Amino acid sequence: MGIKILSHAKINLTLEILYRRSDSFHQLETVMQELKLADTLYLEEVPGGKIALTCDHPLVPADGSNLACRAAACFQSRYAPGKGVKIFLKKKIPVAAGLGGGSSNAAAVLKGLQILWDIPLKEEALEEMAAHLGSDVSFFLYGGTALATGRGELVRPLPPFPSVKVLLVSPANLMLSTARVYGAHVPDKLSKERTKEFVRILENEKEVNLLQLLDLLTNDLEKAAFSLEKDIFLLKKQLQSYGFTVLLSGSGPTVFALSPEEERLERACKELSGRGYNAILTETKGGQKKDLFS
Ligand code: ATP
C-alpha cells in the first residue's frame, strides 16, 4: 500500500529578529503563510526497517541527510522500530529559496507515516519531532497562516490571511544559504511591533483589510540578503515598479509580490519568465491540521 501527500511551500509575511540568543539561535517573531505551490511525496511501506528516497531534483540530496529521510528516521526510532519506507519526492518548490521546501517535506512525512504505518500520534509527539528536525518544520504541521516565535518552532495558528495570488521570483541559478544570510545580519534597535500589529488585526478585526496588512509586511533579513546579492535588491525594485507590494521570503533569495490585481501579476510572471527569471504564480492556502491531500 502506498500513499501520496502534498507538501506545500511558505512565505514569511513578517519576519522580525528580536535578539541573538545564548544558544546562538535568533529569537524570532514571524507570520508564516502556506502557499498552494507544493511538492508531492509518494510513501510506500517496505520490509526490513529500510528508509530509502529517490528525488527528481539533481540538487536535493537523496541520502539520509534529506529532511524527508531524517523525519522518517526520527519517527521510526521513537515510535516505529522495524518499520520501513520508500519515499519518492517530486520537487516543485524551488530549492534553497526561502520557501521552506525541505521543512515542509519533513512535516509531510511525519503526518503521512502515521497513516502508512498506522501509528496515530498525539499532537505533542508530532510537535516534539518537528522541533527536533528544524525550526520551520513545526509550522508545516499546521499550515495556513500562523505566528511562529522562539527560533520558529513555537507555532500559534491564526485566522486566515485574505486569499490572494502570490508571484514568487528569484534570479535564475541563485541559491542563498540561510546560515550565510543570518551571518550577514546586523541587528538594529528599531521597534519590533509590526508582527504584533499584524497578529492583532488578524485576530481581532471582524473585516480584515488586505491593504492594511500589506502595509505591515516586513523582513529583517532583507538588508543582509541584499548586501550579499545585489540582484535580489534589483529584482525587488523591478517588481515594485509594477506597483506590487514586494518582500524577501525568509532568508531568500526568492522575493514575492502580492496584489489584488491578478491579471497584472500574471503579466509580470510571463514577462519575468521570458527574461530568464524563475517566476511562479501561486496563491495563499488556508490551513487544516489533518489536511494532507489538498
Ligand atoms: P531553510 O531556510 O530552512 O534552510 P529553504 O526553504 O531556503 O530552507 P530548502 O529547499 O529547504 O531551502 O533547502 C535547503 C537545503 O536543504 C538545500 O540546499 C538542500 O540541499 C537541503 N535539503 C535536504 N532535504 C531537502 C528536501 N527534502 N528538499 C529540499 N532540500 C533539501
Image: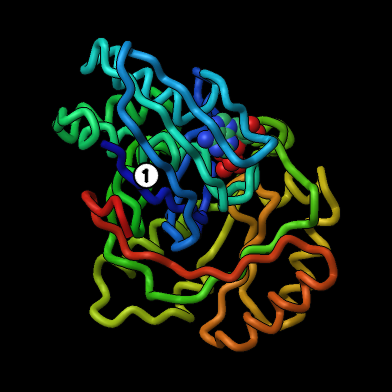
Relative to 196, say whether 140 is above or below: above
Foreground residue among 83 and 274? 83
Task: Determine which residue is flagged by label 1.
Answer: 139
Relative to 239, say whether 12 is above or below: above
Residue at the spot x=39%, y=63% of the render? 197
Kindly tell me whether residue 19 is visible in this rendering.
no
Q: Position of residue 23 (x, y in %)?
A: 50, 18
Foreground residue among 59 and 179? 59
Foreground residue among 109 and 190? 109
Relative to 239, say whether 40 is above or below: above
Q: Position of residue 111 (x, y in %)?
A: 28, 38
Q: Position of residue 93 (x, y in %)?
A: 57, 51
Secondary structure under the numbered disc 1 in the rendered image: helix
Relative to 270, say whether 218 is above or below: above
Foreground residue among 186 and 110? 110
273 on left or right of 105: right
139 on left or right of 55: left
